[in-house]
Image (cartoon, rainbow, N blue to C red):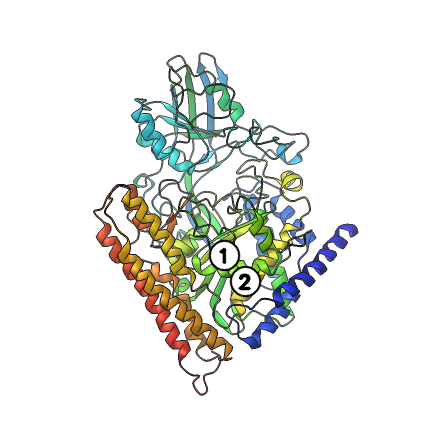
Amino acid sequence: MQHHSLRITRFGILALSLSMSAAQAQTLTGFSPARQETQRKLEAEFKQHQSSAAFKNHLESLSSVPHVAGSPENERVRDYIAETMRKAGWQVDIYPHDIYLPKGPGEIAVELVEPVRQPLNIREYVFGEDKYSKDPRIMPGWNAYSGSGDVTAEVVYANYGTKEDFERLKAMGISVQGKIVMARYGANFRGYKAQHAQAAGAAGVIIYTDPADSGYMKGLTFPEGPQPSESIIQRGSLLTVPYTGDPLTPFEPALPMDGKTKIKRLDPKDVALHKIPVTPLPYGSAVEILKRMTGTKAVPAGWQGGLPFTYRLEGGSSLKVRLKVQQEKAITRVYEVVGTLTGSEFPDEWIIAGCHYDAWSYGATDPNSGTAMLLSLTESLGKLAKAGQRPRRTIKVAHWDAEEFGVIGSAEWSEQFRDELTQKAVAYMNYDAAVSGRIFGASASPSMKKLLIEATQAIQYPDSNKTVYQHWLAQSAGKPGSTRVTGSSAPAVGDNEPVIGNLGGGSDHIGPYMHVGIPSLNAGTGGPTLYHSANDDLFFYNKFADPTYKMGPMVEQVVGTMSLRLANADLLPYDLARYPTDLVTHLKAAEKAIKAYAPTYSIEPLLAAVAELKKNADACENARQTYLQSGRTDKLADLNKGLRQLEQSFIDPKGMAFGAWYRSLYASSDPYSGYASWMLPGLLYEASLKSTANLPDLEARYKKAINTLSERLQALSQGMGAPAMLGGGSR
């Protein structure tokens, strides 16, 4: 134990000395010369408070038992989070929401009926090495929001079950009507596999993990290695309503049924929840079905998986499978836990960091590595505040519930405080599963990219002579470290910088970013994962994710540095010049998608608006630097309010055609795949329909958003250009 703490101290001293020298070389965006030195000293002091032991202790406290949303175990995790933040000196508020959730897996059975009778395994094995695998509270593999039913039918293999896969089956003359669809995990959100199958007339869906995607084809399997072995099951929600949050209360917070404010709820029968039974299987069970398929057609190129035989499209009439799911749903109370460290000068300007705390089982990497890091952060920032070094702006640390069921808790909170967030929120930073490996990665809205780069340049990567930034840049794959955010829209990559991904679906930035319009980012370390399985536990974390426990303190230093810079900057350190740069990339991508079916289409009018935007963005950046260099502090509150409104230029009350809840014209999750990002989603949705009918209206809306942003930047330039007023003050 002492030896361990000695290593931590050495790491702390090394990180401190190297990061101080890195920080000294860096001009801090948004800070006046007088405040630069104060901020550097504060960051150096902050970096003395991280501890691998503290991070490990929190992770063990959070992840020692399975804790699904709505369970008594998850309420104990909630209480631990609240108590830890209170002890650290933070004000803690708990926001209850009553949401429509499955009561649990219910009754699930999958079995071969013909040509043999054989029940199939729906639980992970008990592994002797992994004491956590024995816990009787571990639920079987299941998909939340499955329909209920008991069907016996022939099977059809549908590859990944994407929209294109079902279109291909139809083109090949293969009907899924009345059949059970076998689809492998990957390529899209599992809920869309169910949605597309149901639309095509399927009687049920089995989603399985194929070893070609994750399993023995990728390396050693659990418990010897980190790849899924034959019994590992990916659980997950199927919820695919055209909004994010509680299925019964779109646009409104799901406030408690017994509270003063009454919220009108939809009748569940009027909500487009899945009607057919759906359940996940491990490949050790799926192989029993797939190897018995006798259809005459082999699968097309790209559809073959990693099991040792030729995959076929149809099972044939001699193969019958029974799928039974009986899943009850009910109004269930969940809780958002929000800690507040009130700002000393600008209490009504909020920096928000968040991560959910509910898990499919233990959640050691996903999500609770992020939760543990944020709890350590509240302790570090709490120590600074107790020593008289309170942030200038308010910092909030939010722990969301029911994310795993469909990003529900954070969406409800975003709806509940939509008006206040529109006025006060500076940034939302999401840290779901943020310490689940050793490879750093991030995704961000344009205005947050510079902050990410500068913060990672000021932090040392453990056991190396590199900064986190240099480590990130050197990643050969150059992909976001998060397993949760993939991209269909290519990221806009700057010269000589790491790939910063686009924010897509799959986590708690959706409400703040795509509904409210708060600049957002998602960052952390990733690595091998037993995603949503019972074995994402402390045994896996200790052996495969980070046996050193040094990544927790490192990520905390990156997160704390970003939080403190946002909290203490004179003028918010947004990347103003990034909007026009990124917009050009995404507009050209949208044009290419539309030209594929409308060859004469040109995005030129919008690119012309972006050229004007670039002039105003560059002028605003110059005005900010001049303002700060001259040591001015007049009009700070007004100027920062103007900066906070920039992102909201893209918020359109009409919303997207595929779902009015998604109000950002700039970014949304892909409505066909769920996880992927869609940049300029109005245009991409029109392209997906191969339509030009709505392009004039969409172009007008995009032009208005770009011009609004341009005008706001121009107004800011003028505000910063005027000389200091007598008695201007610092507020």
Q: Do the residues labelled 2 and 1 touch (CB within 8 Å)?
A: yes
Q: Residue 473 location in percent, x, y?
A: 56, 51
Quadrant hosting residue 276: top left
Q: Residue 388 location in percent, x, y?
A: 63, 72
Q: Is residue 92 visible?
A: no
Gap between marks 2 and 1, in whole Å?
9 Å
Q: Which of 384 and 619 is in front in this view?
A: 619
Direction right: furthest residue:
2
Residue marked by disc 1: 429
Q: Nearer the viewer, residue 711 or 511?
A: 711
Give the amino acid type for the residue marked by disc 1 in the picture.
Met
Q: Nearer the viewer, residue 125 or 187?
A: 187
Left or right: residue 461 versus residue 624 is: right
Q: Nearer the viewer, residue 614 or 674?
A: 614
What SS does tag 2 mark? Answer: helix
What SS does tag 1 mark? Answer: strand
Quadrant hosting residue 148: top left
Q: Residue 155 location in percent, x, y?
A: 39, 21
Residue marked by disc 2: 563
| Residue name at image x 48 percent, y 58 percent | 449
Q: Can residue 699 be seen in this view?
A: yes
The number of numbered discs placed on residues in the rendered structure image is 2
Quadrant hosting residue 555: bottom right
Left or right: residue 480 versus residue 246 is: right
